[in-house]
Image (spheres, rainbow, N blue to C red):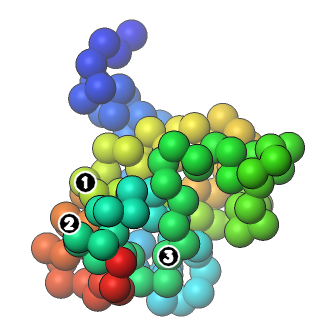
Amino acid sequence: MPTTIAEQVAAAKLTIENLSPAQADAERAAGGALLVDIREADELAANGAFPDAIHAPRGMLEFYADPASAYHREDFDPGRRMILCCASGGRSALAVKALKELGYANVAHVDGGMKAWKEAGLPTAAG
């Protein structure tokens, strides 16, 4: 059983779909996927946002995603293709695992997060 957060992230990445920034951007551009930025608001303001992404801070993600929750958001549909994004890919990997446990079957994350996205020269939006 993993004992450090790094081990938990590595274990999660073995069981989820890991997309490169280019793969995620292609799905976004084609209109086939909803990007969900799980970073905190101050991170978006400081580093920019993923284009066309909705914002769902990590601490509220499961509450927004669960249709039985009082905080459920209509953007979240267990049958919809969703790609989670964070700063470097750790939080989003763990978040994909959590959504899968809630019944989301078609969910992935941007491996490397915003850092890798910017390194790939992909567009960002104002945070």
Residue 26: which numbered mark, if any? Answer: none
Left or right side of 71 for 125: left
Of badges 2 and 3, nearer the viewer stands 3
Element at label 1 = loop
Q: CA distance from mark 2 to mark 3?
A: 16 Å
Can residue 108 be seen in the rendering of this structure?
A: no
Q: Which amino acid lies under the numbered mark 1 shown in the image of this protein?
A: Ser
Tell which of 51 and 31 is nearer to you.
51
**Residue in the foreground of this view, choosing between 71 and 97:** 71
Question: Quick check: 62 above or below 76?
Answer: above
- Residue at position x 49%, y 76% in the image: 53
Do callouts 1 and 2 mark residues in contact (Cβ within 8 Å)?
yes
Q: Is residue 12 left or right of residue 96?
A: left
Name the residue beneath numbered marker 2: 116
Q: Residue 123 is drawn in which quadrant? A: bottom left
Q: Amino acid under label 3?
A: Ala
